[in-house]
Amino acid sequence: MFNEKQKEFVDILLEEQEPVSNMAMQSRLKSSKRTIYNIANKVNDELIYHSIDPIYNKRGKGYYFTEEQKKQIYRQYLPGGAIGRTDRVSYLACWLLYPEKVIHLEDIIERLQVSRNSVFNDLKRVKDIYDLYNIRLEFDIKKGYTTLGTTMNFHSLLMNYLSQLLVNVEYYYIHFIDTSQTSLYFGRLYKISEELGHGEDERNLLVIACLASLMHDRQDEFSFSLMELKDLIETKEFALIDKYFQDFKVLERLYLTIYLLGSKASRTFAMEEDEDNIRLLQMAESMVEEFEQISMAGLLDRTQLINSLYMHFKLTLYYYKLSIHIANPLKKQVKENYPDLYEVVRTVCDKFREIAPFPISDGEIIYITMHFGGHLKQGPERFYRKVWVLVVCPSGIATSALLSREIESLYSNVTVVATMAADHIEEYEGNIDFIVSTVDISTQLPWVKVSTILTNDDKSRIASMMMLNFETYQVDERRMNGLFEVLEKYVPPHKMEQMKQDVYQYLNSGNAIVKIADHEEELRIYDVLGTGDILLLDESIDWKEAITRTSESLVQKKAVEERYIDSMISLVEKYGSYIVLQNRVAVAHGKPEEGANALGLSLLVNRTDILFEGEVTVRYLFVLSDPSAHEHFRLVRDIMLFARNRELLDVLGKAQLPEDVLREIINYMINEE
């Protein structure tokens, strides 16, 4: 479609989110101004020929593509489907592990339809990924690109990056995967899933099927200890893999068993009771305590949370001992829907990296975030009549707990009676009002299908179900529960049941009757912190005086009472310098019930070190109050991002006025958005 320079020009615009000036393009393509104009004109001719709008050129800004143009170009570029930059790197990382023939640079350019420079950049990123898995990428004139590493590391990488790739790219567009074999293996795995009654996520099964296709009949080396073999062979999963995959080697079947087990975060193996278990339980307890101290959030079923984290850590350690990396398919959804909670949990996890008996990866942090999210206290009440809901969610303990909490937090009168796989629904018939399910189910009970992480559309469908059956209406001086009761006055009795089924079918087809609006924008640091809340000092003071003086503005405007200061000091005396984050930044807070009247924030910038216990020093101290114990999460996240930016802290340390501090914080936060 394009020559080399044109490809490079187009690649730059596809990858950039902002317009690229002619001067910047000259620098990146090492070409003259006139040449850039000529390239742009040639590209436009080609785009128009393919019925795609020409390049946009914003006056004073530069060249850019709209998102719709990018989609059209990707489709035209790649007959196999649109593969963006991130997907392209995942594609390349997987392809190079098991090449069917010698791969040279020209093969990659031809396959991915990108410029030479883009391929070089992609290969650099692939090497960075390989480093994380102890895989080495080598090049030889005759052999082309080759990879060196253990079988387990190859499989770990494939499980992770195939999972990411299949979010946006259909598997039959991935040229290095045998589609007929993959379809066959997926069918077998689906049968196994049905027999187990687990309702496995289909994408997880597809990833395992792709891996099975790639590893089958390869000369891979496998190794298991006797303990590991005993554990695996005794599972139902292995019995079914053994039944359906007779054409696979025994060791290949064992690995398929591991990946099938690993696709669910809730599954555990029998492990010998040893010091590891004690260590993991202590880590779970300490992590919950650390989370409570940093986040100021209230937790439901604290003991249950500790137990669920402990069981999750056992599973993680088991896979780590096998050198297995289990991808978290909900990484993107959790980060998008729970960015503030994720940031707090990430900060907590940073404190446990050195003592954890396994690496705390980003995917692991996502799982831990889901566990905490499933045990946060709920928000304000909305309805009054008690409603009993069954959750069908076969994706694991953390996912089920998070989904249940989300549903219960929508309406204070909703109680999730249980979470389970789809094969035990009938046990609850007559004891529930409706079902919320992440998979298709066959039942006469009212139900709605939702995503594992609730979207606004999912919440709209749940709200529609509530309105149909449970919201109280006043009609002709008679109280009626739900829209169906109202409609019964106007619909013949013999048609009422069919109408209900038709409405439920309408909801299960992805529609909604009630629309849930997007959440209001959460408050940021600059929304709460005023110039009167910023104190600049260059004095030698102790940490108690620092907390007291930083709190003065909050006391003056009655956001906190004097006893709130005592609460903050007593917590530091009890737990030590837990409030210190990094780069000499700390955030002090007390218990909401001990004098927090309103959401408030103040900041002390002291050019002289403030000494805490254990020789820990601070120069930037925030004081935070929140009577609700849940509004402040975005502020905590902002403070943690703030604490990581040394350049910003250096600037604030030299500020002369509170106005200067606030201006720098606003500029930083806006640029971060």
Image: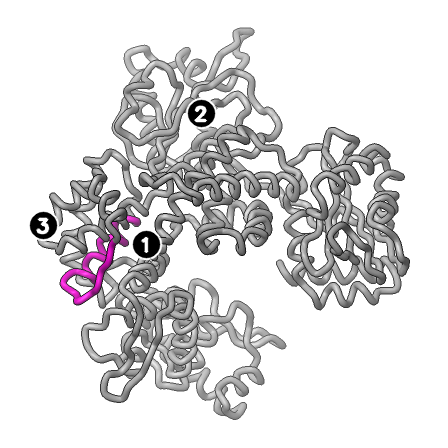
Nearest the viewer among 448 and 654 is 654
Question: Is residue 200 shown left or right of residue 436?
Answer: left
Q: Which residue is mark 1?
A: 322
Extreme front residue here? 274
Q: Which residue is mark 2?
A: 416
Q: Which residue is mark 3?
A: 246
| Whether label 1 touches label 3, CB < 8 Å | no
In percent of width and height, residue 244 lies at 12, 45
- Mark sitting earlier along the chain (3/2): 3
Query: Is residue 610 depicted above or below 34 in this figure?
Result: above
Question: Per the image, is 611 magenta?
Answer: no
Q: Residues within 10 Å of mark 1 (few under 14, many from 20)?
A: some
Amino acid type, mark 1: Leu
Badge 2 marks a residue whose secondary structure is strand
| Whether label 1 touches label 2, CB < 8 Å | no
In percent of width and height, residue 129 lies at 41, 68
Extreme left residue here? 247
Question: Per the image, is 214 magenta?
Answer: yes
Residue 31 seen in this snapshot: yes
Q: Which mark lies nearer to you, 1 or 2?
A: 1
Q: How many marks?
A: 3
Q: Which residues are magenta?
A: 204-224
- Mark sitting earlier along the chain (1/3): 3
The residue drawn where x is 41% and y is 82% is: 117
Nearest the viewer among 327 and 288 is 288
Query: Is residue 66 depicted above or below 358 in this figure?
Result: below
Amino acid type, mark 2: Val
Q: Which mark lies nearer to you, 1 or 3?
A: 1
Nearest the viewer among 52 and 7 is 7
Badge 1 marks a residue whose secondary structure is loop
